[in-house]
Image (spheres, rainbow, N blue to C red):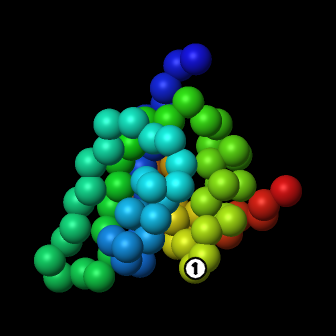
Amino acid sequence: MERIKYKLRAELVADIFLFIQTYKIYIFKIDKKDYFPDTELEFESELSLNDLIKKISLLPDCHVMVETLQPKDKYTGVRIETIVI
């Protein structure tokens, strides 16, 4: 199965570590900005965008990750209201 490159933003680096420890992702890069508490994560996964949204939605207090997750080439960092089905 082909891996897709994704990018997201999290409120805390701890949220990113929880995600990495809970779900199988590949080749990740964490970018912490000194002047913001938010942290960005680039990673590769075989899961679809919808599957990742469903899985991240199960993690406690990770709504910013859900609302900013996009394929890397479409990532803006802007929060998008997401409905999980």
Number of marks = 1
Q: Quadrant of the N terminus?
A: top right
Q: Residue at x 53, y 55 (%)?
A: 22
- 34 to 30, vertically: above or below: below
Label 1: how many Cα within 10 Å (few below 14, some 14–19, many 20+): some
Q: Residue at x 22, y 67 (%)?
A: 32
Can you name the residue that lies furthest to the left here? 34
Mark 1 — residue?
61
Left or right: where 51 falls relative to 21: right
Q: Residue at x 26, y 56 (%)?
A: 30
Q: Position of residue 84 (x, y in %)?
A: 78, 61
Q: Quadrant of the C terminus?
A: bottom right
Q: Please name the amino acid that badge 1 sits on.
A: Asp
Residue 82 can be seen in this image: yes
Q: Position of residue 9 (x, y in %)?
A: 41, 64
**36 or 60: nearer the eye?**
60
- 29 to 46, vertically: above or below: below
